[in-house]
Image (cartoon, rainbow, N blue to C red):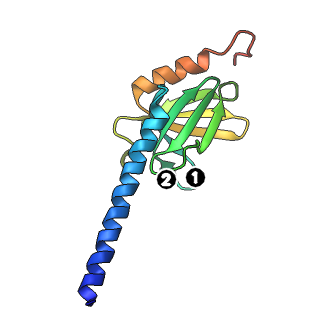
Amino acid sequence: MPLWQWLLDALGLLLLLALLYAVALVVRRRLISRDGGTFELSHRVRTERPGRGWLLGIGRYSGETLEWFRIFSLSPRPKRVWQREDLELVGRREPDGTEQVSLYPDHVVVCCDSPAGQVELALAPASLTGFQSWLEAKPPGAQMP
């Protein structure tokens, strides 16, 4: 078989793999959001360099926890999970500099304290209202900050 046919077959295989990956991402997103309560949520995993370290993702409320899924991962499990009782909203700000390019449009950055340290999340203003309500809706008897 000539070389050009091998290259054509390899290109076809790469296109097929890319298509399968895209379909798998869509199916995964549908499975994650089938119970509702999902929203676009970015998480800052590295804080060494200003404005860097953001990963796009999907947030989902699941009872007393907030689950975060990476957007381009095929894993059905959340990458991070935060307990409602462990998060305390400290402040919010607009994205600055390179953050505006790294995040979804019109998202705001919120800073939360947790036992593991500071957590920075970026979400839409409408989702922020829901997030604040979820944080304030602790069960009876829970400690309020």
Residue 116 placement, left or right of 30: right
Most foreground residue, 39 or 35: 35
- Horizontal and vertical percent position of residue 75: 54, 49
Q: Quadrant of the N terminus?
A: bottom left
Q: Is residue 41 above or below residue 17?
A: above
Q: Secondary structure at mark 2?
A: loop
Q: Is residue 135 above or below residue 7?
A: above
Residue shown at 54% from the left, 17% from the top: 133
| Separation of marks 2 and 1 at Cα, in angstroms | 7 Å
Place of residue 28 in the rendered image (x, y in percent of width and height, measured from the top left):
46, 43
Left or right: 101 in relation to 118: left
Q: Which numbered tag is attached to residue 52?
A: 2
At label 2, which amino acid type do we have?
Arg
Q: Residue furthest front?
A: 1
| Residue beneath the point at 55% across and 27% down | 61
Which quarter of the picture shows residue 103? Answer: top left
Residue 46 image label: 1
Q: Quadrant of the C terminus?
A: top right
Query: 40 or 87: nearer the eye?
Result: 40
Disc 2 and disc 1 in contact, CB within 8 angstroms: yes
Inspect this view and state whether residue 99 appears. Answer: no
Q: Amino acid at mark 1?
A: Arg
Q: Position of residue 8 (x, y in %)?
A: 26, 77
**Residue in the picture at 49% in, 51% down:** 73
In the foreground, 52 or 136 = 136
